[in-house]
Every structure is written in C-alpha cells, then in structure tokens.
Image (tube, rainbow, N blue to C red):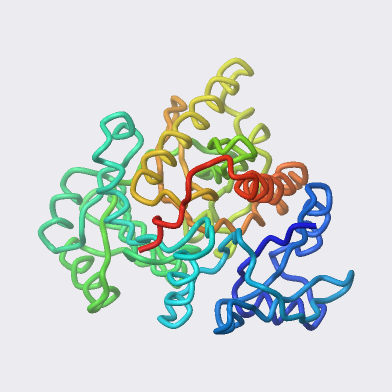
Amino acid sequence: MNKVGIMLDWNIIQHGINGKKSYERLPYYVEIGRELGLEPVFFHPRHVLSNGKVKGYFWNGSRLVPRVVPVPQVIHNRVLTGDLKARQVIRSLSKTQLVFNGLVVRDKRKVHQMLWKNPQVRSYLPHTVPYSRDNLRHFLDRYRIVYVKPSIGSVGIGVVRIEREGDHYHFISSQYRKVLSRQGLIVELARWIGNKRYLIQQGIPLARYEGKTFDIRVSVQKNREQKWSVSGMVAKVANQKNKLSNLARGGRAFPLETVLRESFSPEQQKEIIERIGLAAIQLARQYESYYPSLADLGMDMGIDGKGNPYLIEINIRDQRYSFYSAGEMAMFKQTYRHPLEYASSLMRGMVPSIRKSSQ
C-alpha cells in the first residue's frame, strides 16, 4: 500500500497520540485511504528527520502510534503556522517531494491584488484597500457598511463591522459594541488596530435568513482528474450580537438549501448554487496561477438579495467543521476524499511536478 503524507498541526497530532478527537477526522483519512490503496502517515514538520525519514504516526483504530518511515513522496499539507522552523521544513520538503497546499501568501490584501488582475473574477471582489485614516474616511462616505479586518487572521478574530446610521456609527466586534460619532469611531479604530496591518472592505448587502445575514462556506478542491471541483457548500448564519458568521464567534451552520428556500424559488436556488460554484472555481484557478501547489481551499462567499456571488475571503486550510455542524455528512466526508484522490493521481504521475510552487 502506498504511503501518503498528511502534515497536521502539532496540537492535532498530540490529540491523536492521546486518543482524543479534534476537528481533523483521522479515521476518515484511513478509511478513504484504504479504498484508494493509500496508507496515511501523519506528522508535523518538526517530526521530519535529517536522513530522508520521518517519525510518522499511524492510526491504530483508537490513537496515533509512532513509526519511523521514509518521507512519503506525496504530502498533503494541512499545517498553518507562522513558525519559521516549521515553514523552512515545508519549503525544504517541497523541493524533493510533491507537497500540495504548500506555503503561500495569506495576506488578504495581497491575495485580493492577485485575484483582481483577472478581469473575469473582479465582479466577485468587494472593494478592498489597506487601512489608513484617509481610506477609512473615503469608505465611510461611500458605503453604509464597512469591515475593518486584520490582513492576516482567521475565525473572525479582530474583525470590526461598522454600520452607519444617520450621523452615528455602530462599532461591532466579537468583544463589544459601541455607538460612536464619526470622530469617535476614528479614534476607537486607531486604538483597536494599534500598529497591526489591517485592511478595509466594502460591506456587501448580504441576503438574510430569519432576519440574519449569512455567508456560504464553499469547499473547492482538486479531484482525481486534477480539476478544481466543489466538494460542498454550507450556509453560516451570523450571530445577531456581533454580526459574525464564524462558528467560533457564535455563528450557526445550516444546509444551504434550507437558507436559500426562505427567499428564493427552486429555480433561483439552482441557478444561485451554480453561480457560486462557477465563481469559486474561477477564483481558485486565478489563485493557483500564483501558487500551483494549491489543491484544497475553503472560500467564504456571500450573495446579495439578487443572488449575485461575492468573495469574502479564501482560507488555505478549511477546517471543514461547518459541514459537520450543519449535518451535511456526505459533503463533510467528500472534503476528505477529494484530496486523497488527488494525492493518488499524483502518485500515478498524471500531472507535472508541483514542487516549484512553494517559495
């Protein structure tokens, strides 16, 4: 049985060693891998040894157990880290092995610029600029809803939603809410941001479900034919208190059809789902043009009241639990199957080397 590398975050490996569950369903990798003739080798970059071998971990049915083996030829990178040593290991592995979803630029502003260069996807991109006081004033004049978010971040940490109401502004974060004057808002944001890099983004007038805005997590992955495909879509409905849809910030996941049914006819629903899928694949292809190793993305997308799709942000490592939370178990499992099918196809030598992708 061919061995496939599954590179995971340190805490996920530790959970597995202790027989504890995490958002990574290790048995899924094993079960699907067995169907494809693959044996998963789980490891973190710091487990890579200097002799072409790795202290890998194997699932024995209840926990991870260690065994030193040669570094697998094909590796699915599920590690997201700023640790320089770990990143250096990933970069080094990418020169000798086939590592997909290797190191990429995650800065939201830079990603926006990469995507904007393709005229075909511009209609999906909200107006986005680096944070500055002048840019903030311009956005406050132009849009009723504005988001201020970290250039690098996830699960809604540090995000502020600003809603204009008359001469005042609602400052809404996961930590607190305030109603401020324009000058008070500018001062509050300066305190909130400090010396960190932030961006400003146009707020899309998102469609609603039961009076609450929602966005859509779209899993876009390469399949056994090495083509981008949609593994699943699920709606994330915002928490009314902080207006964030992230499940870690109080959002709730629902099957997409359940949410669309409230405002759209069956014919409209079908068209909207097709448009979202087309947009997601076009965006993935454009991002991939800069980073050919990309093969597994989680996109947060929104639709307006007419069903027009917009990209909110791209996640390099989709944690997938939105599908589980919504009860979409077939989609949830599909998000594990497609990367393993892609890994299997790489082993068969059906595509050119992707080693050049990590920089």
The residue lying furthest to the top in this view is 267
**Residue 298 in the figure: left or right of residue 121:** right
> At 32% across and 52% down in the image, what residue appears?
111
Indicate left or right for 312 with 299 as reference: left
Q: Is residue 29 above or below residue 274?
A: below
Q: Residue at x 58, y 77 (%)?
A: 52
Instruction: Determine the image quadrant of residue 198.
Output: bottom left
Residue 32 rendering spot, x and y as whole percentages:
79, 51
Residue placed most toward the observer, 289 or 178: 289
| Figure check: 256 above or below 335 | above
Q: Position of residue 39 (x, y in %)?
A: 77, 61
Is residue 9 positioned above or below 239 on the image? below
Q: Nearer the viewer, residue 352 or 171?
A: 352
- Residue farthest right in this picture: 61
> Which percent across, then down, holds residue 322?
64, 53
Number of marks drawn: 0
- Residue located at (54% from left, 20% from top): 271
Q: 21 or 177, which is in the foreground?
A: 21
Q: Residue at x 76, y 55 (%)?
A: 38
| Quadrant of the snapshot with the N terminus | bottom right
Image quadrant containing the C terminus: bottom left
Picture quadrant where residue 199 is located: bottom left
Would you place residue 312 above or below residue 205 in this image?
Answer: below
Q: Position of residue 128 (x, y in %)?
A: 25, 49
Name the one closer to the observer, 197 or 2: 2
Determine which quarter of the picture holds residue 191: bottom left
